[in-house]
Image (cartoon, rainbow, N blue to C red):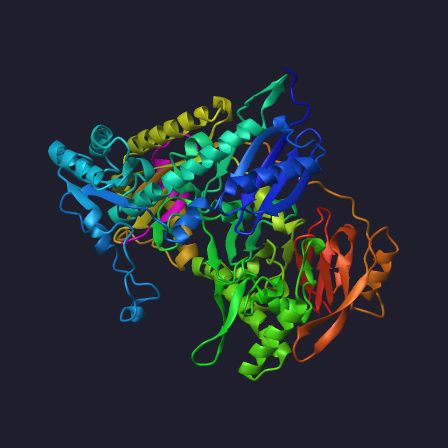
Amino acid sequence: MAAPTRRIRIGIDTGGTFTDVVAFDEDAGLLVTTKTPSTPANPADGFMAGIDKVLGLLGLPEGHGDAIAAVSHGTTVATTQLLEGKVDRLGFITTEGYEAMLEIARQSVPDGYGNSYFWVKPARIVPRDRVVGVGGRLDFTGAEVRPFDEESARTAARWFRKHGVHTLGVCFLHSYANSAHEERMRAVLAEEHPDAVVSLSSEVLREYREYERAMTTLVDAAVKPRLSAYVTNIKTRLAEYAGVSTGSTTEKRSVPFYVMKSNGGVLSADEVVHQPITTVLSGPAAGALGAALIAKVAGFDRVLTSDGGGTSTDVSVVIDGEPTLTTEGSVGAFPSKIPMIDVVTVGAGGGSIAWLSPEGTLKVGPQSAGADPGPLCYAKGGTEVTITDAHVFLGRIPPHLLGGEIPLDVEAAQAGIRKLAEELGLTPEACATGILEISAWNQANALRQVTVKRGLDVRDFTLTTFGGSGSLLLCRLVDVLGLPTVLVPPNPGNVSAFGLLTVDVKNDYVQTHVSLADALDPAAVATMYAALSDQASDALTKEGFADSEHSFVRTADLRYFGQAYEVRVPVPDGAIDQGVLDEVAGRFHAAHRGLYGYDFAGDTTQQVEWVNLRVSGIGPIQRPEIKRHATSGFETGASAPSSTTGSSLVEEVAQQPSRNPVTRAVCFDAAAGYVESPVLWRDDLVPGTVVTGPAIIEEFGSTVPLHPGFVARIDEYLNIIVTRSEK
C-alpha cells in the first residue's frame, strides 16, 4: 500500500453561518484558508464539504482524503444546545435530604440585590419531580457517616426507567473526597437501567461546593447524547473519506481527530465523548489561542482579543502568550466550574438589531437578525435595521461580502436607516453613526470587564481584532479605551480555525483539599499532586504521547481564611517542601494585591487557606510556522508632504501588479459628512507599507475602516498595525 505523499493537518471551526477551514501542509509549510456554508440541520455535512473544498485548493483531486494527517475541530453543538435551552428529559440523583439543592442554589441575584424585586428565578435544569434522593452519607474527608443504601438506589433507578428518563446526573455530598458511593450508584444503574446515560460528579468535577458541582455534572449529562452522536458521526465519515483505495475497495483509515476544549487544549474524539462539557466554549477558545500566538510572534505580550461575528463579540485577555482561565464561567443560564478560557460575550455582532425602547431611546442588541433572515441588506426578508446596515449606509463596508460572492442590497439598508432616523428625529448619518457608537461602547464595556474588573489597566494592552466584523470599530475602541495599538491578523475571518492548529492536547485534574497553610503537610500535598499527575500521564499515554513528551502544570486555589472565593496561583515544578509552600503563599499575596489592591502578607492574624490542587497534563502538537516577510520600506500616505488622506498610497499601489484602485464616499463623522476615501485591497499592501486615514482596507472576509487621524502599518508578518497618528 503506497504511503500518502503529503501530510495535511486541517482545522475546522463550525459557526452558525459559515464553517471556517484552515489546512496546513506540513512538508511544504503551506497554509490555505477558506469558508463554506454551515449546515445547521446536520453540521457534519458542512464539516465534510469544508474538508473537500480546502483539499481542492491544495491541488488534490476530489475525495483524495488519504493525505489528511490529522483534523482539529471547534464545535458549537454543546454551546448551541445549552443557549437554546434544548435540554431533554434529565434526571438528578443526590444525597437523601438534599433534593432541593437545585432550587435553593445560591443567594446571589443577577445585577445585584437592587434587582431582587424584579428578578424571576429561571426554571431549574431538572424540575423538582425528577430529583430523587438516595440514602448514604460521607463527610468532608470522605469518611463514611452512613452506608450507601442499596435498596433506595435500586428504587431510584427503577423509577427513572419506568418514567422514560434516560439521561442522569449523580452528585452525592462530598463525593469529591471519596467516589465510592457514586461508583456504586453507577453500578446499580447499569443493572437496573442499562440504557441510561450517566454522568458522575466525582469524574466531571472533583471539587467542593455541591451546587456548582451538581450543575456542572448535569450540564455534562445533558449534552452527552447529542455531542457523542455528532462526534461519532464525523469520525466515521472522516475514516471513510480518508480511506485508501485497494483496487475495487476502499479501506477505512483512522484519522487522528481532535476536538477543541474550553480550557485551551484539544482532546481526541474517543475521549471527548466521555467529557462533553469540556467543549462548551471551544469556538471562542480556539480564536483566543490563535490570536494569542499571532500577537506573540509579532512582539506583543499583553493582548486583548476581540472576535466579532454575526450575532456577538467574544473578548478575552492574553498575558505572555497565555489566555487567562476561569472556573467561574457559565453557558447561558447554566453555571460551569470546569476550567475555561475567560471569555466575555456581548451581543454586538453584525446582525445585532437597532431598536427603540419604550422611552424612545436608541438601543442596539442583544437581539440579532442572525444569518436568516439577516440584515436588511441581505435581501432575505429581514425587516429590522442592524449594525451591518449602518456600516453599509455609511460606506464603511463594500456593497458585497466575501470578495463579491454575496451582493448586498444597499438601497434596502438606506431605506431602513432613513426610516429609523425619522422616528428618532435625527439625520440618517447621525442615526447610523449612533448605532455604531452604541455598539462600540458595548464592546468597550466587555473589554473593561476582562481587564479593569480583574485589576488590569486596559491601556497596557494591544487589541487584536478578528472575525468577520471584529475590526470594523477598532478606531473608536482606541479612542474610547485609550488603547495604544490594534493588530489585525491576516485572514481575520479564519483565526479561530487557525487556532485549532496551534493548540496542544490538554487535560485538567483537580482535588479539593481545604487546609490552613500553617497546618499543611508538604508530604500530603506532594502525594496528592503525584496522584493528579499520574491521572494526567495515563490520559496522555492513551492519546499516543510518549512519556518523554508529557509535561505538567501545577496550580493551587488559595484564599484568606473566611473568604468565599479563591485566587489561582502557579505551583513550582520539582519536589514539594515547606519552602515551596511558602513561595506559593507569597505568590497568592501578590496575586490578591493585583486583583483587589491589597493583601495581608504582613498581618499574622490573617491566615492563608489552601482549597484546591490542580494539575494540567499537556501533550505537544506541531504548530504551523508564522512566516516572516522581508520589509520593503514602502511607506506612503504618512510620508506624503502634501497629503495625509492616503491618496498617495493609491497611486503607489497602482504602480504594482494589482487590481485597479478605487475610492468610495465614506462617512466617519456625522457632522463632517461623507469624504472620498481610497479603497485598498489588503493583498496589495506589502510589509513596510504605511496607510494614513481616511482609508478603507478590504480583503476576502473582513474590512478595516481607517478613520482620519489613524495610521496603519503592514508589519513583517503581514499584520495590520493601527495606531493614532502622531500629528
Looking at this view, name the residue that lies furthest to the bottom.
Answer: 425
Image quadrant for the N terminus?
A: top right
Q: Decide if residue 126 is in sight here.
A: yes
Relative horizontal placement of residue 704, taking residue 598 as reference (left or right): right
Q: Decide if residue 552 is in sight here.
A: no
Place residue 696 in its image quadrant: bottom right
Relative horizontal placement of residue 211, taking residue 348 as reference (left or right): left
Q: Where residue 112 appears, x then y in whole percent? A: 32, 66
Q: Please determine whether, in this image, residue 171 is positioned above or below residue 643.
A: above
- Stretch in magenta: 563-584
Q: Residue at x 14, y 43 (%)?
A: 96
Image quadrant for the C terminus?
A: bottom right
Relative horizontal placement of residue 619, taking residue 299 as reference (left or right): left
Q: Where residue 133 appears, x then y in whole percent? A: 16, 43
Looking at this view, name the residue that lies furthest to the right.
Answer: 655
Q: Where residue 236 appears, x then y in whole percent? A: 49, 30
Q: Residue at x 78, y 55 (%)?
A: 689
Q: Where residue 465 appears, x then y in whole percent? A: 60, 55
Relative horizontal placement of residue 243, taking residue 80 as reference (left or right): right
Residue 288 part of the magenta-drawn span: no
Residue in the foreground of this view, choosing between 6 and 157: 157
Residue 574 part of the magenta-drawn span: yes
Q: Please determine whether, in this image, residue 722 is positioned above or below residue 278.
A: below
